[in-house]
Amino acid sequence: MTSLKPVSLALFVLLLGQCQSNPKTPIKNILLITLDTTRADVLGIYGNKNIQTPNLDHLALNGNFFSQCFSHAPITLPSHTSILTGLNPLHHGVHNNINYALPDTTPTLATLLKEKGYRTGAFVSSFILDSRFGLSRGFDLYEDNIVHYKKQRDQKEILTRRAGDTIHHLEDWLSQSDAQQPFFAWLHLYDAHAPYEAPLPFRQAYASSPYFGEVAYVDYELGRLFEFLDAQGLDKETLIIVTADHGDSFEEHGEATHGFFCYSTTTHVPLILSKPLFGSPGKNFQHRVQSADIFPTVL
């Protein structure tokens, strides 16, 4: 197999300058959506015939998507830190979900875009991304107040919340936005992480594959969000970037879930852009890119 060298998305823009299809409406706003524990090969647009993800598929077919995107770590906090700083864990210093926090001196997408006049908001779905770990810097609102969701999911002690709940907070924030001020919003959805207890009817539809049920549910909620953006007149001026922090092994390579090994099962993630920034709509790029490349591309 031919080896693919990593190519920065930011550099990729320059390389494709002559064939780039500029959106008819200039991009003013940026919505970054990170899906926890979502392998690239679980989505329909990436070739999976056993799941229905029509909303993410539609987003990719009207924009661009990358079939060879890899995260920098197989766990949540280090990977998200790479996405928001453009640095790998060796350089940003966050190596697990518990013992590290991003230094105050490290710039993030939020701090830099806020300096450029953007309204900034983050909406996370798990305690792993609590503000204490440093990713809240630069956000006008960092919505991580999920303690009261503690026993909502089948009465279990899980400090997470459903996609629909987190999206509701984002929509409230967007409804209060000044139409003249650009915004940068980060939405994190945790549902695809174990335990797999998708709401009905997704739990029934994917009874033999509960993980697929969670991903299908997330796609449904994202569809509702996309409809909201359209109704608010925000869709045309907003670039939506969808990616994941990592995947899951599901017993491959001797690993039950994720967090230890860096095989493609845990590092190969989707990367979807809602606008055809690179070539024609629906273009699938085979160039290998990394999660940290999102940072310079946005800036």
Image (cartoon, grey):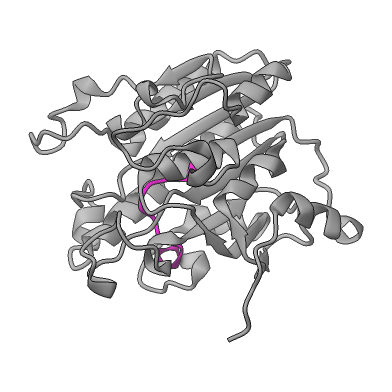
How many numbered marks are there?
Answer: 0
Question: Residue 179 or 192: which is nearer the viewer?
Answer: 192
Q: Which of 258 and 158 lies nearest the eye of the viewer?
A: 258
Q: Which residue is drawn at 29% across and 57% down?
A: 258
Q: Residue at x 23, y 52 (%)?
A: 201
How far across and down, in percent of the image, does residue 285 sit? Answer: 67, 67
191 left or right of 155?
right
| Nearer to us in this view, 73 or 204 | 73
Q: Residue drawn 56% across and 55% down?
A: 271
The answer to whether residue 47 is above or below residue 9 is: below
Q: Is residue 191 above or below residue 169?
A: below
Residue 87 position in % (x across, y down): 57, 42
Which residue sits at x=23%, y=49%?
198
Which residue reaches farthest bottom? 1
User: Magenta part of the protein: which range?
Assistant: 33-43
Q: Is residue 130 magenta?
A: no
In the rendered image, which quarter is residue 25 located in?
top right
Q: Is residue 138 left or right of residue 98?
A: right
Q: Position of residue 15 (x, y in %)?
A: 84, 59
Q: Can residue 230 be seen from the camera position used here?
A: no
Where, quadrant-wise, is the N terminus in this rendering? bottom right
* Nearest the eye: 67 or 29: 67
Would you place residue 261 above or below residue 71 in this image?
A: below
Residue 290 horizontal side relative to residue 99, left or right? right
Mark yes or no: residue 99 visible.
Answer: yes
Lateral position of residue 281 relative to residue 211, left or right: right
Q: Residue furthest left?
A: 155
Find residue 195 and report its horizontal and vertical position in percent: 18, 49
- Pick out the residue farthest to the right: 18
Q: Quadrant of the C terminus?
A: top right
